[in-house]
Structures are given as structure tokens and as C-alpha cells.
Image (tube, grey):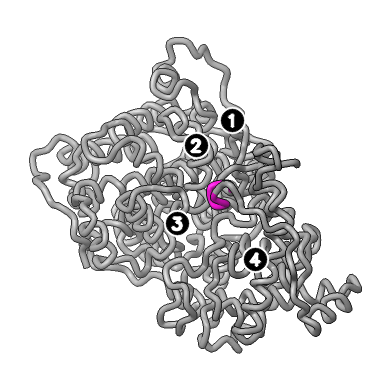
Amino acid sequence: MAHPLPEGPSAGMDPFLALERRLGFLPNIFKAQASLSRAVAAEAGIADAVIFSPGTLGRKLKEMLLTAVAATRRNVYCTTVHAHFLTTLGIDESRVARIVAGAAPEGLDGPERSLFDFGLRLGLNPNAVNGSEIRRLQKSGLTDEQILEGILTVSLARFLCTLAEGLAPAPDFHPLEVGAEAKSAPSGQSGPNGHGEGPYIPPPVLAEEGFPPFEFFRRHFGFVPNIFRAQTLKPEVLEAEVEAIRSILLPEDLLSRRMKEYILLVVSARNLNTYCVAVHCELLRGLGVPFEVSDQIALDHRLAGLSPEESALLDFILRLQDDADRFGPADFEPLRKVGWSGEQILEAIVMSALSNFLNTLQCGLGTVPDFPVRVDFGNPSVNLSGPGAHPTARAPDPSPSTQDPDAPLVARARSGDLEAFERLVVSHQARVYRLLLGVTASPEEAEDGTQEVFVKAMGGLESFRGSARFTTWLTRIAINEGLERVRRRRRIGEVKEAAATEEPFRPRHVSPWTENPEELLSRREVRELVEREILALPFNYRSAVILRDIAQFSTPAAAQAMGLGVPTFKTRLLRGRLMLREALAPHFTRGAAGEKADVHL
């Protein structure tokens, strides 16, 4: 069903004419953007530079990658279009069918097969790529330019998939069946996520002065981001990317530049892309947004003091990012109610697609941050209240699986779909780690325990009947795993005693806090202090505070996760909060002379 976005004339417009000449027809994904022709021109430019310009990879292999990535992402529109192009290139139907099913086509061997498998992995889980994979591709005989072209092709595939998911264009051909037999990408170790050994492909040394793309970035950004420095092997692609940024990011006739950066930031944060988060926080600083605000937008935009209109648009973008399978016309209504026009919503979807393109490209290139990292998604212990820590943000109370956003993935995982389970792991691993860190107060135990939790979850999926949300069920497994690890460290006696006596806590420090604690938490040093004091609480109270105040579970859901009645849980939560307040009060109150106490770290 098409989404309610404005339509405009496409016949006779230059970008559409160029696309029609190049492709032999005008795909509906571009017709759906007729009211934003500058975006269409930019997209056509990138596609031309990546797919059609002469390079070291053949067009057939590129279309195979585009088809396979779309199929593994279960994107019917893009899979159908690229499968059509494969048949026009002379690929027989049986080979195309194998690609649509997520398998390498017959006859694809050697370096090309290695690049195909790598491309599937990058397209399905960009953060899983690392430098050792690039080195293996180089040793297989692939040149750096071929590898770069493969990375660019996969990044373009994710760009187009995001557009198709947001726009829901009518099929250009009879839709193919995808999804039932689609396989996950080959497994491997996690990549550096924006702060590792890269760039994986050393760029050629060139005279930077007078190089037009670099001059553009210096003029508009004040620096040349490493993600673009790493692509100088393909200057024609750099020029197309510059034109896309000029046409999509810089104009302010629809969305403001700041709003566009917000979109790039929240999508990058949702993709756990440390590099892109650092870049967009720096660009927002140049637009007058303090680091504290941009950091909070990356972690949870709802707590960043944005306007209701801005918050609604970012909610919409994250809904598209998180739940594309169920994204539909109803998701547009809240935006129209707060005043966003169809053209503005269209531009927001294009910005989301551009962010996924850049995020995928960065993971494939392995570029290191241009600025110091403050929000580090490569280390899940950095922020107890980081992204993914709010599993009940849209529906805080426990509800049946029919209302559970994870229900479709859970159903597929129960039927043996490993890709679906991998997506559940990626979605919940940071939150499980933070819960285990809170329970065990040990980063090593939390890291080991996270792996064990997902092993147990996979083995226990058959017993999960959906009477509670998947997040609640997974949290109960994490709590039990944490308790078992505490028991092994011989602290279980202390835990049992605390649980049995439930002695009241009488705070000694009752001075009022002179600042709003929520505002204080936006400051990094205070957030670290609070996290340290939470980890110092006794187990029972620490777990209650983390579930309710950090993970933001509702009281019934948190009580259920801990296996407690609601009254008992409320008692532990109150005592935990009082203990935490007691520990923090000296830092947040004024001394006798009226001076605010310092925060000592």
C-alpha cells in the first residue's frame, strides 16, 4: 500500500529523463519522489557513479550484490527491480532465483565469490565487518578498487532499501517472493564500529589543495571527514556524494539543516555507528547545539528537550529504521497532526536513506573518528542508559505478543530463521549487557553473561509463548543469569539476607537537591558518577533501580522480570532510590556557606 506522500510531475524532468534513458524505464521508487526532484537527481548521480560508470567490477556482479542484499533484507520492491536487471543482463532464471533465496549463484567462484559473501555480510550487519575480512579479500586477489566498489554497491543497496521501505512504491514488475528462504549473511567477529584500525583500504596520496570535493567539505563543514578521504580511489563517486550532500543536506527550503542533522544522528546511533555519531555531533555543535544536547539525542531524543514536532519526526524515522516490515500509512498520521507537510516527510525519509548509506560505507571502510568519541557504541559499558535501554518507550505496560514489536522476529526465529535471531541479538545485546553489568557489577561477568543469555534464549524460544513482551522474557533470563553469577562469586548469602529482612532504610542526608537531577544527568561527568553509585548499591535494590529508572520498564513489567509481586518490587525500588539519593546528595546540595558542593570524580 502506497504511503501518503505528495506526487508531482515526472515526465519531461531532467533527472527522470536521464534515469529513463539509463534504465530503459522510470522505476516507481523515483516517481514517488517527484515533488523532490533535487533528491532524485542526487540519487541518480550516485547510482550512475557506483553502478554504471566504468570500473573494475562488472555490472553483473554489482547487480548480483544489489539483488542479494535486498533479498536478505526482505525488501520485495528492490529485489524485484534488481532481479529484472539481472535477467536483462543475460543471467538465467535459475541463477537469479538462487540469489533471491539468499544464496550465491552457481558459477561464482574465487575472488568474486569472496566479495559476494562479504557483501551479504556488510549489507545485513555492517557492524560485524572488520579489517581482517578486507585483508582476506586482498589476499584472494581482489584489488583495493574492486573492494571499494563492492562496499559502495552494498551501501547503495541499503540506501535504496530504506527509500523503498519509507515510500512503499508500487511494484514495477510482478513482485517476487522473498523472505521464506532468505539466508543470513556469513558469521564472523564484530568490527571496530568507528574507532579501530582503519581505514582498511589505504587511500592514494594526492594534492588536497584544489581537489574540488575536499574544497567543498572545508567550505561547508570546516574539515574533510575521514569517510570521504578514504574514497579517493573513486573520485567520480566522491563528486556524486558531494552533489548529494549539496542537494539533500544543505538546502533549508523544507527541513532545517539542524533537523536533518538530528535525523542523521539518530539513525547513526540506532545503527551503533560511533564514527558517524561523532561527526554529526560535531556538525551540530557548529550549528549551535551543545554537545550535551546532541549526546542526549543520540542516546534518547525524547529526553533532549526537543519540540514535540521534532520529537515526532524522529520517532517516525526510528520507526522506519526499527520496524520497516510493519511501517505503513498509519505512521504518517502523527506527523500530519503536528504540522509536518508531505514534502518535509519525504525529505526526512531521504535523509534516513542517506544516513544508512554513509553508515554502511563507514563500516566497510573502517574509518577512524575525526573527533574525540564521547558516545562510544563499540563499548556497551559506557552508558547504562544508552540506546536500546528503553524497550517499553512506545508501550510501557506488558502486553501480548500481538502488540510486541519483536513478535514478527520472534516468530521467524522460532521457526529456525537464524537471521531473525541475529537481528534480535543486535537489537537487544547492549541492553542485556547493561542489565548484567548492573546485576553483577563486573564488566567481565556482564560480557560473558550476555553471550550466555542469548544462548539460553535461543534454546528456550520454544517455551516462549508471548504472554509477556520478548524484552520482559529476555530480561528475566538476564536477571537469573546475573544472580547465578553472583552466587558463584559467593555473594548470594548477602543477597538472600537483604531479600529476607527488607529492613527499612533511613537516609541521613535530607538536604534538597539544588538542581534538577534530570538536567544534571545530561552532563557526562555527573552521569558517570550516578552510574558508579548505582553499581555500588546492594544487588536487590540495584536491580530494581536499573529495571525501573534506567531500562524504563513499567512497574508491573519490572516486577515480573524479577519474579516479584508489585508491592515487594515497589518496596525495593523505593529503598534503592533512597540509597542512591543518600549517596549522591553531597554532590548535588549546597554547603553551609551557600556554595554548591563540587562533584568529586
What label does residue 69 carry, if any?
3
Of mark 1 and mark 2, the one earlier in the sequence is: 2
Dots 3 and 1: beta carbons under 8 Å?
no
Q: Is residue 127 magenta?
A: no
**Which range is magenta?**
516-520
Q: Earlier in the sequence, mark 3 or mark 1?
A: 3
Front one among 277 and 235: 277
212 to 515, vertically: above or below: above
How many numbered marks have been drawn onto this rendered protein structure? 4
Query: Does label 3 or label 2 sit earlier along the sequence?
Result: 3
361 to the left or right of 34: right
What residue appears at the point 25 percent right and 61 percent down from the top-left corner? 332
Residue drawn at x 45%, y 56% is: 69
Front: mark 3 or 2: 2
> Residue 45: where, in percent of width, then height?
30, 35
Q: Residue furthest front?
A: 593
- Element class at badge 2: helix
Q: Amino acid at mark 3?
A: Val
For disc 4, the marked residue is: 546
The residue at which mark 2 appears reads as: 281
Q: Looking at the picture, which amino acid does disc 2 mark? A: Cys
Q: From this view, report whether residue 455 is shown above or below residue 275.
A: below
Indicate the amino acid at tag 1. Answer: Phe
For the C terminus, the image quarter is: top right
- On residue 371, the disc is 1
* Marks 3,2: beta carbons within 8 A: no
The residues tagged by marks 4 and 3 sit, at their Cα atoms, a distance apart of 38 Å
Q: CA distance from mark 2 to mark 4?
A: 27 Å
Mark 4, secondary structure of its residue = helix
From mark 4 to mark 1, how far is it between C-alphas?
A: 31 Å
